[in-house]
Image (cartoon, grey):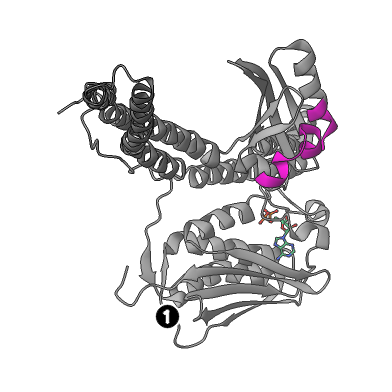
Amino acid sequence: MFPQIRWRIAISYFILVTVVMAGLAAFLSRPGCLGDAICVRKGVSITAVLLLTSSSLIAYPLADQTTRPLRKLTQIMRRITAGEWEARMLPLTRDEMGELVLTFNDMIDQLRQQHLALLEENGQINTVLNYMADGVLITDGEGQVRLINPAASKLFSLTEKAALSHTFAEVVRHHQLIDLWQQCQTEGQEVTAAVEIGRDLFLQAIITPFQEGWAAGYLVILQDLTTVRHLQTVRRDFISNVSHELRTPLASLRVIIETLQDNAYDDPETAVRFLNRAESEVDVLTQMVEELLELSRIESGQVPLRLQATAVADLLLVPMDRLKPQAERANVQLILDLPGALPTVLADPTRIHQVVSNLLHNAIKFTPEGGQITLQAHADTENQEIIISVHDTGMGIAKEDVGRIFERFYKSDRARTRSGGGTGLGLAISRHIVQAHNGRIWVASKEHKGSSFFFSLPTASPDGP
Ligand code: ADP
């Protein structure tokens, strides 16, 4: 009936005062009362008492009724503060309180939307930071770490929590990075540098000062360039290796040509000898170029495998027959040890022939006369693969060379001095071929006792490839 609180209070008091005043007027209008000072005083006193009592009686329920929505609103605010964003209050009255409740609900709706938008934005930033490969750190102006992403935590072997309670210097513990941060602080502009941490971590550090509103600090980005640097080293080594390998036969050819030019061709016997030597040097060059091309084709995936379920015997007998004459010439015994029932393997026969030939060829090359070479195969049922191995009783491989012989161009010193040494590419090619078959290749060797080369091939599933 009275939508505004102020009107409700004013009218209640107006009625109260009017009624009491009417009562006082009636009291005073009694015969003889107006002329009697005691009667008037009595009337005024009664009126005052009545006014006081009744206004108190009206004030309490009025105040209670007026503040009830406020109390409810306080409760709702507490629930929202505790994260219960859905908590709402329905406007119970259509007065100022009702209006306050409606405005409050609108405000909470807007705040909630802003909160959700912030959460989403925050979530996106966190996802980027969490999944990015680069390390990211933010420090304040004094160098206290304010943010660190998982990649950076991993780089410095620290948990996020531990990092946040420390300074940049304590977190990175690396003088070059600390100097770089200080340089950025002094110059007030972005600084970049390549930093080597330990022996095998190579970082590109970019430190940028920022001023966002009231917040100022430094953004540190750490890019792990170890792989890139490793690739650069491999490429550099590769070029120097190729040049080195080409230089030897080319130098030989030059000597042969110069000798022939110096009239050696006048003596047919010498000329033939020199021409034969020239031919074998050209063979070495041709083999190297062919192997290099082969390696490059395999590495770039240009040699598609024609995988098929193949009997293990078919993979071993062809290279065995191919290399038998060579083994006989070198006077080493070639033995095949193949169990009867082996599961078929998923392989490209031509490529695996190449691997087995290469292993046998090396075994013959590095086994002295009277030695023995055994070609074996057995099933590893647990891993569902077949292990093929070549054992020899040859010179073996020095401990320091064992980990490197599958690298391109790697040859042990003794292999280099051995006549008829190869290009150092055979094992690198074999490793690529085996890995392309989802297999592994490894070696076990003891110097002066012999070497055993192993590689695995997955067995073909019973349903066929
Ligand atoms: P290469 O053409 O020189 O044989 P590989 O890549 O096939 O090139 O072999 C690399 C090096 O590994 C060889 O130079 C040799 O030092 C070593 N090696 C390979 N097989 C054997 C083996 N059966 N016995 C001893 N050393 C071996």
Residue, x 34% and y 38% (percent of image)? 57
- Is 22 displayed left or right of 398 in the figure? left
Which residue is the site of mark 1?
343
Q: Which amino acid does label 1 sit on?
A: Pro
Ligand number 1: quarter of image: bottom right
Residue, x 72% and y 36% (percent of image)? 202
Query: Between 192 and 330, which is closer to the camera in this rendering?
Result: 192
Relative height, residue 376 to residue 362 (above, below): below
Q: Name the quadrant containing residue 42.
A: top left
- Is 277 displayed left or right of 53 in the figure? right
Residue 115 forms part of the magenta stretch: no
* Residue 223 percent across, percent down from the top left: 64, 32
Relative height, residue 221 to residue 460 (above, below): above
Residue 169 forms part of the magenta stretch: yes
Query: Between 207 and 297, which is closer to the camera in this rendering?
Result: 207
Query: Between 178 and 125, which is closer to the camera in this rendering?
Result: 125
- Does residue 309 appear anywhere in the picture? yes
Residue, x 31% and y 37% (percent of image)? 65
Magenta part of the protein: which range? 160-178
